[in-house]
Amino acid sequence: MSLTQFAKRFESAASLLSIAGRTLLGLETNPVPGEWTHITKVDPEGEKRLPLLFPSYLSHTSAVSVGGSQDVTDENTEQTFELLTDSGVTAFHEPSEATHVTEKTRDHANFLAVPEVLNGDSESLVGTLGKGIDYVREDLGPEILEQKTGLPLSEFLGDRAGDFVAGMMMDEAVFEAYIIMNVDSAAAREANVTEEDLLSPQEAKERALAAQHHLESEIIYLEYSGTFGGDEAVEMLEAIDDGVTWSQIWYGGGLDNSENAQRVLDAGADAVVVGDAFHRVAELEAELFDRAREEFDGDASAEQLQSWVDETVDIEDSEAVNYLSTIPEVTEPEQRAIEYLAAGLEFGLAVADVAEELSDPTPSEIRTAVSDRQFAVESTFRAIPGADANGMVEEFAGGLLADHFDLEMPERAVAAHFGIDL
């Protein structure tokens, strides 16, 4: 038997075993964990800020999806991944452009999620993917091989070097098959989804089956993008769930309370995806920080701030509760919200107090001032599994101070992602 014949038989046998495992034997071969019930979308875009206590909020989510469609670059994507890695959260990359994928993002991301739109035009299904593969073959692939081996392998192997990396990355990637049902959304505009492209529940089920059996998409994603799909979404999910057995079913769009989140989970979604509600927490925190600086002179205790937040904010209707209540595992989201908002304010006020003690500092003096100061939030971060509590405190505080004093420090890039500004 020739090597070529052996390779063909081996590949055929492996494919048959994979199909048998996930259909006849019911084995869990999908690389996307079935226990995930809540995904938080974190957008690197400058306008989409993070609350200062984002590690605590994200400690309750199953995983974080990093990506966005506007003002996203490879640089701010790398910064976002570095922040999330320190916080101990599981994060994967859903790029809107191939150039957002770098060696750093690959190192940080749990996996690469490639979107493909089932009811858009052909560009949104294969055109964008083709451009991405071409970028990997021509640019990223040879660069990765050279960095890993220290040798200019593309000079010896030619296009085969890029083909190897492109094939490896596509084999490792997870594919998200989108069904977009909000024609007024940015996602619909990008995929050219119009009223004529909207699907009935039966059509959605058929597209989902094609995605599972032909495209082998690990995720079927029903996307209403910014608005809740209501009864229509429930009916769509029930139909998709009736057909799909291997792919994970995700729902995203307009979720900001526990009732709607549970409703789509009960209808067949394996996980809910929440993005806007999370970023709006940063807006609330920034607003409260400005008010707290006027209310409190210098440091304030956690107890003082919790009482003040409870009195100042309509907590049941707050952005913090809206986000936390979409996570099935979170009990008493109102109390959690008060604790997290107060802890974030306490940290911000303490850093502002350090800023008042400094005058035209150097980067070294900022780092010394931060390391000499005991920040109460460190104990909060220490309770998060896998988080580098001390490292996060020094990086966050140093970044806020560097930004305040207009100093060029690596930490300053971190501060650019926070809603709070000293």
Image: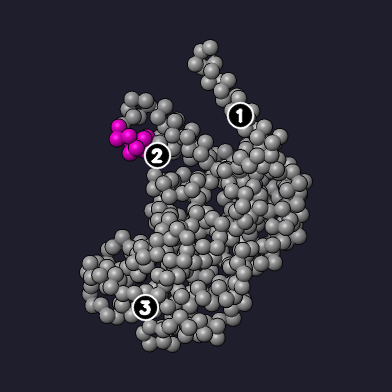
SS label for mark 3 = helix
Mark nearest the camera among 2 and 1 is: 1
Viewer-side label of 2, 3: 3
Which badge, 2 or 3, comes first in the chain's sequence? 2
In this rendering, the answer to whether 401 lies above or below 78 is below
Q: CA distance from mark 2 to mark 3?
A: 43 Å
Query: How far apart are the alpha carbons under marks 2 and 1?
Result: 28 Å
Quarter of the image where one finds residue 185: bottom right
Three-letter amino acid code of the residue under disc 2:
Leu
Tag on residue 140? 2
Q: Amino acid at mark 1?
A: Ser
Mark 1 element type? helix
Residue under label 1, please give it.
15
Q: Is residue 371 left or right of residue 138?
A: left
Q: Which residues, given as a range, are shown in magenta?
A: 142-151
Residue at 62% across / 49% down in the picture?
Answer: 34
